[in-house]
Amino acid sequence: MSENITSKVALVKCDSYEQDKVDAAVRKAVELLGGLEEINITKESRLVLKPNLLAKNPPEKACTTHPAVFAAVVKLLQDEGYTNLKYGDSPGNPVIKPEKIADECGLKTVADELGIPFGSFEEGVEIEFPEGRVADKFVICKEVVEADGIINVCKMKTHQLERVTGAVKNTFGCVFGINKASSHARFSTAETFAKMIGDLNNLVRPKLHVMDGIVAMEGNGPQNGTPKQMGVILVSTDPVAIDGLFCHLVDLKPELVPTNVAAMEQGVGTYKDIIVITEDGEITPQEAAEKYGDKDFN
């Protein structure tokens, strides 16, 4: 993606995890973006929803994707005729089964109610990626390899190494869990790790990104930070743009986030040229920061 590309991010206010409110906000954000037809998938496509399931924490800790946001995305897809759905994530702890983490985080209950099975995230497939900038192969979860498309349902959080973790970084959960430690060892600096994440995004290329920013995490993220009310749902087909807008909302320059810089350099998306679409019309990221942001976010 060249630097003169303009990306759109839909922003809709949502002040609580009350299910009806979240359903409406997610639906409105996708509509503002142009509807599900914008993601170029067929109704028969095998889709995998990829939430953030970092650790066994309850939703109120703001460590993982909230069940209400996950449910809203599933229901929207189902209502629009997309029924071949699975979900999952591959956290880094090889001892704990991923579906057990989904249960502890409240997503399994919602998924079971909506008839969405947990996918094959306990088996990895080695994929060669010779075009990678720093990574020429990945071990990717089988369900991701076999999917026609990924729907990235990420969380708005801080991150010790990369400053923030949002849409771009959430794809790391597509890497088979036991291989995450070796990735951190091999790509040990913020810059090299970010370039690896850029390569990963070019490999798995999620179709749509939905960010749970109703209650974000500030401070010592991505696991031990503090919940912070932000009151927004963000949706985009460009993960760099959605993370770039996240940065503006929390008074952080997007160019200070290594994953933004690497992913933009590697053609994943852009954090420079963003149009923010709201229910009141199109605004700039700077205007969005003034109206919807929080300069006290740490």
Image (cartoon, helix red, strand yellow):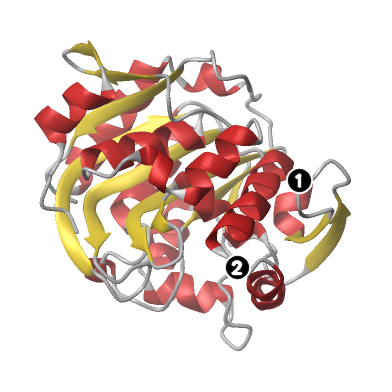
Q: Which residue is mark 1?
A: 133
Vertical placement of 30 versus 168: above or below?
above
Vertical placement of 260 versus 35: above or below?
below
Position of 24 compared to 53: left or right? Answer: left
Residue 44 x, y percent position in the rendering: 68, 30
| Quadrant holding the C terminus | bottom left
Query: Image quarter for residue 82?
Result: top right
Residue 24 x, y percent position in the rendering: 24, 32
Q: Residue drawn at (70%, 46%), measured in percent from left and top?
A: 199
Q: Secondary structure at mark 1?
A: loop
- Residue 150 shows in the view: yes
Which residue occupies the foreground of this view, 16 or 9? 9
Which residue occupies the foreground of this view, 80 or 160? 160
Q: Which amino acid type is shown beneath numbered disc 1?
A: Arg
- Residue 20 shows in the view: no
Position of 143 compared to 155: left or right? Answer: right
Q: Residue drawn at (56%, 72%), measured in percent from left and top?
A: 91
| Quadrant holding the N terminus | top right
Distance between mark 1 and mark 2 Cα atoms: 23 Å
Q: Which residue is mark 2?
A: 90
Query: Image quarter for residue 43?
Result: top right
Pointer 1 local density, CA inside 10 Å: few below 14, some 14–19, many at least 20: some
